[in-house]
Amino acid sequence: MGEQPARLADGGRIDRDDRRRFTFDGRAVSGLGGDTLASALLANGIHLVGRSFKLHRPRGICSAGVEEPNALLTLRGGARREPNVQATVAELWDGLAVTSQNRWPSLALDAGAIGGMLSRLLPAGFYYKTFMGPTRRAWMLYEPAIRRAAGLGRATREPDPDRYERRQAFCDVLVVGSGPAGIAAALAAGGAGARVILVEQAARCGGQLLAEPVASEAESWRSARLAELAGLDNVQMLTRTTAFGLYDGNVVGAVERAWDHVAEPPPGQPRERAWTLHCGHVLLATGATERPLLFGDNDRPGIMLASAVRRYLHDFAVLPGRRAVVVTDNDSAYPTARDLARAGAAVTLVDTRPRAPAAAGEALAGERVKLLCDGRVERVEGRRRVRALAVTHADGRTRLDCDLVCVAGGWSPNVHLASHLGGRPEYRATLDAFVPGALPAGQSAAGALVGEYATAAAIDSGWRAGLAAAGAPVTDPPFAAPATGALPPGPGPAPRPQPGGRGKVFVDLQNDVTAADVALAWREGYRSVEHLKRYTTLGMGTDQGRTSNINGLALMASLRGEDIPTTGTTTFRPPFTPVALGALAGRRVGRQFRPERRTPMHDWHAEQGAEFVRAGPWLRAWYYRDHGADVDRAYVAEMRQVREGVGMVDVSTLGKIDVQGPDAAEFLNRVYVNGWLKLPIGKARYGVMLRDDGFVFDDGTTSRIGEQQYFMTTTTAEAGPVMSWLEFLLETAWPELRVQVTSVSDQWAGIAVAGPKSRRVLAAALPGVDVGDDSLPPMGVRDAECGDGLPVRLLRVSFSGERAYEVYTPSGYGRHLWERLLEAGRPFGLAPYGTEALGGLRIEKGHPAGPELDGRTTLDDLGLGRMARDKPFVGDVLRRRPALTAGDRRALVGLQPLEAGEPLRAGALVFPHGQPNEGHGIGHVTAATWSPTLGHDIALALVERGPGRHGETVTVASPVHGEAVTARVVAPVFIDPDGERIHAEV
Amino acid sequence: MPRSEREWLQSALAGRYEPGVRATDAAPGLSLREIVDWDLVQLAAWRGRDDELAGHIGSVLGTARPAPCTGVDADGLELLAVAPLRLWCVAPAGDPRLARLADSLDAAVGCVTPLGHSHARVRIGGPAARALLAQEIAIDLDPAACASGRIARTALHHVPVLLQCRDAAAGVFDLYLPRSFAASSWEYLLDLAEAHGYKLHPRAGPDSMA
Amino acid sequence: MLRIRCPFCGDRDHAEFSYGGDASVERPPLDHDSREDWYRYVFVRANPKGRHREYWQHVHGCRSWLVVERDTGSHAILGVESAAGSLEPARDG
């Protein structure tokens, strides 16, 4: 057929009726349903798919799985453009647009590769030396050019249009990997009644069984066992799902590419889903990865892993080349040679060993495969596709014409997950590979991961591990292992062939690290594996060095004259394969990045044009646009409204705590610095709490509602910490106290009504409630019910210094109360105000708040030292530390500019007048506002020996604004120092 | 109950609640409903007096105290053991037994805290109910691990919630969302629910099915 | 990801808990006036590798304060108890 010329007429797990068109660098080609992108490209005879990271060498498809170092492509376009996708992992869909990466102007003719110029520019250790050496500054100059030349694909800069999802799941046994061992393990555990989840990163289950022909005993076994698994209700199978990390508590992170194999996910469906799997037992059956061989120009397109070629033959019915050379140092590549020959290729097998073992020889009996032993690759011909191989062998030297070279350098078990919790893999000499070391309780491993490469042995080990994981007695498998065409690597490792031949010997194909680079690292003293990795970037690519780690390690070991276990191995960290950040975020994006807290009156504020400000999770009304074109105009109008008439502000965000119990007064007396034993019912008191270390923690008013019942308020910011602190004290320090504390922050809506007309507004809004000064004097508290039944809690407390009330009602009635007050207040000119005006009012009055309660101030710093009573209370001992009582501490003062028009800003530094504005100064401005009462800016500041400086002149500098204002230090109370306005009424 | 309560009362989900079907399939995977007209009172015992609190409940309701993290239903009044020493009593609004439980508790045994306005309550049913909850909640909701009556205070996207399994076989759950977070959590839940398709039912009382 | 078995609520994700510091130091009585002892209680920590008793609050669950024994080397949770003394039976998660 004209299209897909390398597609075989028979076989494969592809759907020949499902033709899928796609483009590769604009060229229209086609594949079939069930293809990966790599198998479809190979079916079209396309091997050259990219240029390498650093040296821009032409590269082809090397593998058939997640170990692929070369075939990184950019998929899709527009907002969905995604770079660095492994062609061997991506599934083909109709209409897919694929572009190659890191080439200019085209894949076939790449300017970056001319003369190998980058090879000389970017030796091993380039990045290391650049960053660590004196050339660090030059990096800034060259970085853009180098990044452009050496790199991978480019991600889109548009917002991701797709949905992602997170999911929690629980199981008794998690089986990772669905090869023969994983299938047997899941069946064993599932049959024993355990809740089982089986995850498989590929679209099809089977692992190495997929490299067996569709008409084979192995395939019959695979489909029969998968059908049995599907019949077990207690077994959940997740395909296209990669277990990317194994974490403490047997929690496994996995990502399911749920709808990544189609052009666009169906509506509402996630492209990817991040699973958090909580597992009683984790059974790893993650298999093994074949290693390439080291020889000169071993990176040419057309050089592939032998096991991958067999997979392409039988899973995808693709013949990647018609004249093949198989180069191997073990038995496992013999079936590839045999099956290539059977598929019609001319095949030569070059075994690096002096002679082929009997088992291997048998595999070739009667097949048309030429066998050359004691072989070495001398030279590779062909740049954009391998053309010939020159080899030496027992009988001399031969030049082999070829378009495909299959390499087989043995197997590396995929120990990554087994190492994520810090377990060191163990070198097993008989396998020439690392296997998992001792695993903690609740984890086990089976199959090729533990070196059981033969199918029957893998099945047997999986079955036994599955039963053990489920806590069932261990028996023999109930099914016979199938005969397969595969061969295990052999009885023992062959001597590792030394890299030889002409050209660069690539160890890490993705990061362009050569054997010479490893030697350079060794010569320059970077000899530990961790140094080797960082110096050469070996194994640091997106493929995490799956095909290169052991080869690099072996090279370093031989340079050091040591064995591999002495040389050691690098650390494996999650994720096993790249994970989209979107999948980890799920739907926690945009407005749902974090939850928002809204007061019961929130929607009213929004409807009436409030601008909101964030206070932790809370959204609070900052100011109302009706009151001014911008915040500066609006808040001044709102402040004036309170001083001259009446305003109201939503204070539902205050922390509210119900404190009850026979020992409640004693409890409050211990946590607050001031006295609480004599507070009568119906009265509120301002209280300050310290931390154990003697610094101020929080403040607020607490009211005595009943004999044993108190209503505590805290600041908005510290509501949560105060609640936890009170619970801590009651449960650990004073369990003998009969006290219960319950957060009622969400139960109550709160509104502060402030201003000389505030009482009259309340009287009008709350029919039947006596709000006269006799029944509700300053610091008075009343629970009441209006004539129509609306329940309210009234506190006569003031933050602004004006006559003011806090009115609370159950939060479901919050909006109603707000609107009722507004309606009743209309004749009095009542208007709402926001947090900016709230802050301005308290600055005028000199009340410490969040900016002053910054965790570094003491009672004395804030001028509150008089509050402390002579009784034990939290923080009392350490507040008397010398450093906290020293006279030079920064303490609260007021500042006002000498020239009325000059600005004071929060964050500005305070310097002695007439001295250079250098260093940190003698204090800083904590809060500033324009005072409509005084007609100029005022500020609160923490200044060294502040109270002793009243009347002094200082410089208030805000370097970021280029401002230096001369100001006078004054008392922090700017208006009504005698506190008469809380009685004033108009 | 005040005469005009219904006029005054505003759901925390107001403005974010439009009954109807949002699904691409004929059969939405989720059935959602806000539960209204209920009240909640917390009873808490002083340390060491929890047996007397249990006795108080027995004498008023004739019901044994629920085991930790479970609820019992006494003719429509549900007792939820939400924390050590603490029970939530949840009943249809106006159930006189709530007032009896509260008013007759001996102050030497414990205390009463009304919390009826502190939460929005949402009922989640349908075949995808567990899948929806499992998008955020790290608790095993399998019927074998989470039977009918089981409750759990847990976190939903950083928000402390109470989850109640009402019917393990049918997969019906109630979520109590803290009032101040409720609008935000509700918007989040609806967003997550889009993956399954949902039918949002008109608000109804506690005895309605999802 | 740690899973902590709250004596009241059962097995829960560590994200539901907040860390509350070293539980092996003894808090002086409130009326204890020794600045040295308070200094030791507030500031001086052993920072051991291995078994460590620490406070956690089940802040998104039943809000109980717990004493968790944790191996700081392996993160293994070796035991959990209510800080106020176990009052009600633990149940399986």
Image (cartoon, coloured by chain):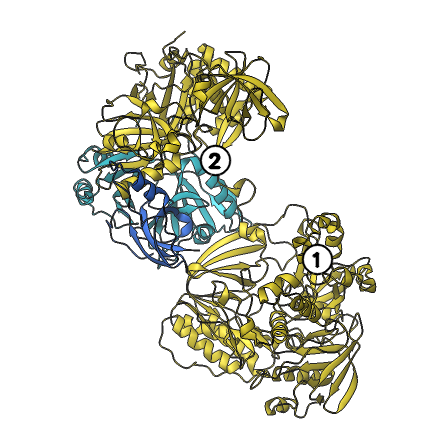
Residue visible at 55% across and 44% down? A589
> Residue type at mark 2?
Gly
Say whether mark 1 and mark 2 are on the same chain.
yes
Confirm whether residue A695 shows in the render. no
Residue visible at 69% across and 88% down? A374
The chain whose colour is blue is C
Quarter occupied by residue A304: bottom right
Confirm whether residue B187 shows in the render. yes
Task: Find residue A63 and report its horizontal and vertical position in percent.
Answer: 66, 71
Task: Find residue A88 and report its horizontal and vertical position in percent.
Answer: 65, 67
The correct choice, above or below, for A943 with respect to A99 in the image is above
The chain whose colour is cyan is B
Please tell me the numbered disc located at residue A616. Answer: 2
Q: Which residue is mark 1?
A: A152
The chain whose colour is yellow is A
The correct choice, above or below, for A162 with respect to A52 in the image is above
